[in-house]
Image (cartoon, coloured by chain):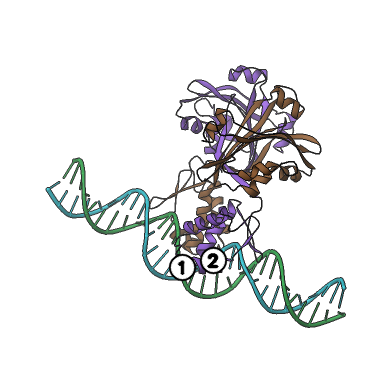
Chain colours: A brown, B purple, C green, D cyan
DNA sequence: CAGATTAATATGTATATACTTAATATTATT
DNA sequence: AATAATATTAAGTATATACATATTAATCTG
């Protein structure tokens, strides 16, 4: 009997997954080290490393130097959501995208906004409110504050032909950000814009992006009723 | 002048990020190939490969064989959400976790459930309804259907000391699944269990997990009002 | 025996080399 | 000029080797 050959890191990964699912390596179990697995699989340690490292990134394995590799006892599933520009989302559904600028003004933001963006309380920012449409129907309502200190060029942009969403991606790079998903009842204003009943449960995304230590923009996107954000595990 | 040395894939990645953020390599731009970058950075091609491959995984670069590597014109931000067992979420907030079983019965599910799980319409499943508590306050309401064909041992488990959530992770492995986030208005039943007003906007997670071609469980988790799911970009 | 030192170990990473694969560009053929 | 065959290119991957680093285990020392 010759030992099986696993020639690619993907095939090694599949075999490791099989053993985990088959409970040959039960949750919490310490699995053989890379060198031994490489020997067993008939491949190099680098190949085993790539396979195991990738699985660790998904949360299914837990690795520590010297301590070895364990099957996660309670795998923390990592769901990766793709946050693209809204136009792309709509077009991916095979619908026609359109957007309408509802408000555009330069003003001092509420303290909650200036505090979150860590800007001086009396500094004016650019405020935008826009409605995104899919096949002519309201899809999402966007409320946005843009720091004019960080993105002064925004002052000169009208945002009627291009959404702030896309304009910022092109003109204001960010290094990091945070994002939160939640649910709110539609306010009268939301209901009016989205064409739904006041109080309807709406899915919302709040995002705050930074360029190094400067807050670039803070945006809340309120989706029309029934919106789902989905992904695979 | 000696050329700068980038000895680790992380430092190469940082330099590449710097160039992207500084617009030295603007969105859509074709960047030099791996061999040239390796030469420039004074490291091996494998090191450059690791740096660029990792950036491509985050959506900031777009790579194709022969075509080369481009800075993404419209970077699709990948937000990774950690979906752990609810107990862990609650404990991570520094709160005391508890749960209460509200219902447990073996019955034929609604057609919507059996259809989603691709099981025969008249097959009975185990239905569980449980309330998760944080510091004694309602945190989330769980509605779950478990396939007894796939997980027969579930019949013998009472789920009063361990939540179905955790029990399944330990006893019913899954190969893949899909997950959806959305918002609903609280029904009377939800409101009663969660101690909120009927109609309140609630954040929900719907999850369906599979073991190869068999649906293992379908669950809806309805969170108490105000719940946020957050992550970084 | 507590605490510090040292050794051992598994993962993490860098490198040179070689080959594979997908996509494109070029050339030959009809 | 359209089509097919061929060459070229850049990323993708495998391998052996070497060394780094975090962590644990063993040993020494007061």
Query: Residue A123: where, in percent of width, then height?
Result: 56, 34
- Closer to the observer: label 2 or label 1? 1
The picture places residue B79, in percent across and down from the top left corner, at 59, 43
A36 vs C20, nearest the viewer: C20
**Quadrant into which the C terminus of chain A falls:** top right
Residue B96 in which image quadrant: top left
**Viewer can see residue B175:** no
Q: Counting other residues with Cα less than 10 Å from the Cα at mark 2, is it few (<14), some (14-19), or many (20 or more)?
A: some
Quote the CA–CA distance across marks 2 and 1: 12 Å
Say which mark, if any, is on residue B61. Answer: none
What crowding class fits label 1: few (fewer than 14 Cα within 10 Å), some (14-19), or many (20 or more)? few
Decide which of A147, B171 is in the foreground and name it: A147
Rendered image quadrant of residue B152: top right
* Residue B200 in view: yes
Is A49 positioned to the left or the right of B28 in the image? left
Q: Where is residue A167 shown, x and y percent of the image? A: 67, 46
Among the two numbered marks 2 and 1 on one chain, the one whose residue lies closer to the N terminus: 1
Judged from the image, the secondary structure of the residue bearing numbered disc 2 is helix
Task: Say yes or no: labels 2 and 1 on the same chain.
Answer: yes
Mark 1 falls on what kind of element? loop
Q: Which residue is mark 1?
A: B3
Expressed as whole percent of the image width and height from the top left, the position of residue A111 reads 55, 28
Q: Which mark is residue B37?
A: 2
The residue lying at 57 percent from left, 34 percent from top is B229
* Number of numbered callouts drawn: 2
Chain for mark 1?
B
Q: Please state which of residues A29 and A172 is positioned toward the viewer in this rendering.
A: A172
């Amino acid at each position: 009997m010759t030992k099986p050959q696993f020639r690619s890191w993907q095939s090694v990964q599949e075999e490791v997954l099989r053993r985990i699912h088959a409970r040959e390596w039960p949750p919490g179990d310490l699995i053989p080290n890379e060198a031994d697995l490489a020997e067993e699989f008939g491949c190099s340690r680098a190949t085993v490393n790539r396979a195991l490292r990738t699985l660790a990134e998904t949360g299914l394995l837990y690795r520590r130097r010297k301590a070895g590799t364990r099957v996660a006892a309670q795998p923390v599933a990592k769901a990766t959501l793709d946050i693209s520009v809204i136009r792309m989302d709509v077009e991916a559904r095979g619908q026609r995208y359109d957007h309408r600028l509802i408000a555009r003004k330069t003003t001092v933001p509420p303290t909650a906004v200036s505090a979150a963006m860590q800007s001086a309380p009396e500094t004016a920012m650019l405020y935008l409110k826009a409605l995104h449409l899919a096949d002519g129907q309201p899809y999402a309502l966007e409320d946005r504050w843009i720091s004019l200190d960080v993105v002064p060029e925004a002052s000169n942009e009208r945002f009627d032909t291009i959404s702030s969403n896309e304009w910022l991606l092109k003109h204001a790079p960010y290094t990091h950000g945070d994002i939160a998903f939640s649910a709110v009842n539609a306010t009268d204003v939301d209901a009016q814009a989205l064409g739904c009943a006041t109080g309807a449960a709406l899915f919302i995304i709040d995002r705050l992006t930074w360029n190094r230590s400067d807050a670039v923009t803070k945006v809340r996107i309120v989706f029309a009723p029934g919106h789902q954000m989905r992904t695979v595990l």
